[in-house]
Image (cartoon, rainbow, N blue to C red):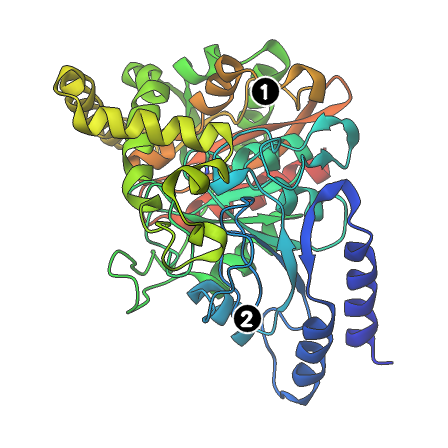
Amino acid sequence: MTELKSRITAAIAAAEKKPWNAFRLVMGESALRQAEELEKREGPLPLRGIPVAVKDNIAVAGVEMSCGSRLLEGYVPPEDAEVITRLKQAGAVILGKTNLDEFAMGSYGLRSAFGPVRNPLDPLRCAGGSSSGSAAAVAGGIVPMALGSDTGGSVRIPAAWCGVIGFKPSWGAVSRRGLLAHASSLDAVGLLAGSAADCGRFFDAVAGFDPGDATSFDPEPKARGVSGLRIGIWREQLLLADTPAQKAVLEAARLLERAGARVLEISCPAVILAGETYVVLAAQEAVSCLARFDGLRFGRGGEPTPALRTRLMGAEVRGRLCLGSALLSMEELAPLRRGALCRRSEIRQELERAFREADLLLGPTTPGPAPLLERAGDAGEERKADALTVVANLAGLPALAFPLGEAENMPLSVHLMGRRGEDRTVLRAAMALEEGRGAR
Ligand code: GLN
């Protein structure tokens, strides 16, 4: 057997054991076929023979996509998502679909209709969500790269808790065609990888304008060098984290400084309201994004009555749709609705000001390490976990979670955020962190 085929066979075997409940479906036969076809393709390909796992809310033609929900069970998309087409062109092998919180609503990885995902570093802890299966598949060494989606932190939170890299590109820098929409103005296809260099290659393969997604664009082709880069430590975000996570941020600042960057402190107080703003906007948008599951076209949603269909959704999804519908239709709630839009523009303006002083903003990705399963799931706690990550979605900015530091024998993570379109500068800084961490 060729080296390529044996690599893919090993990945299939590892995934088929369904460790940590990370995989919903393994595409064994198709992955082997892809490997065979690859062997006939000549020339260098940037991701030749790399097995990639795909969050089960991104369409792969002919492969069931259930989005962690009973409602969509049995739905088979007819076309590949644009990111899948690009990955195949780059020589990657699509290995299977990964488990997620139902309709990507969650931060812990506990809300899939097909059971929770466990953390490969400690199975008594959460993997984080909602791209839980993808993060576990990378952290557990089954694949070096996986696709996720990030509406409010769903790639960065599980990356942080599983000790891998999670990157949410600028809004539109990667096509969303074929990603099941959760809240379109916040959604991004996200990347999970074991190293910053891999994450960079992964991004190069999928990024850029797609005529099938009118909101897509080409990000800056060149990265700014780290030398001379101004890194702003974000005071308000730092204060939301526990002491070990704060220390990790200071350590990241030191590593970047050693690579030639200049470190300063930045204040951006309006972002303290980002969590609430996100809850209102995401719930409202989810109502229109999920309205297409009306029982006429997709999966088991074809149940005879709306009441039966609703029963196929989990409590969280139902709750958010109720909240969103109320916000959209009740006059008494109009101030909340308008307030969220105002705060979103305030947050954007504040960040614009911050990015005049700094080129990158640095903070913690999550306040602490992955919680124990038995302690997770509380809605208030969940909002806390999201508070640090939703800002990047509200402002459409590129943001990356980088594993650094430790608490309770689990990894911690620092968060780098850049200007819209400067995705490659964020990735370059992550590479500098990786080099600095290795050289320590
Ligand atoms: N945790 C957030 C939520 O529950 C973010 C989800 C996401 O990014 N998809 O909505």
Q: Position of residue 366 (x, y in %)?
A: 54, 23
Which residue is identified by label 2? Answer: 62
Mark 2, secondary structure of its residue? loop
Q: Position of residue 41 (x, y in %)?
A: 63, 87
Name the spot of residue 96 as percent of width and height, x first: 65, 60
Residue type, numbered disc 1: Gly
At horizontal 56% and vertical 20% (from top left) the residue drawn is 250
| Residue under label 1 | 377
Q: Quick one: 236 or 143, which is closer to the camera?
A: 143
Residue located farthest toward the right when viewing the structure as drawn: 1
Q: Quadrant of the C terminus?
A: top right
Question: Disc 2 residue type?
Answer: Gly
The residue nearer to you, when weighing 28 against 365, is 28
For the residues labelled 1 and 2, the Cα–Cα distance comes to: 34 Å
- Earlier-in-chain disc, 1 versus 2: 2
Q: Vertical placement of 288 versus 371: above or below? A: below
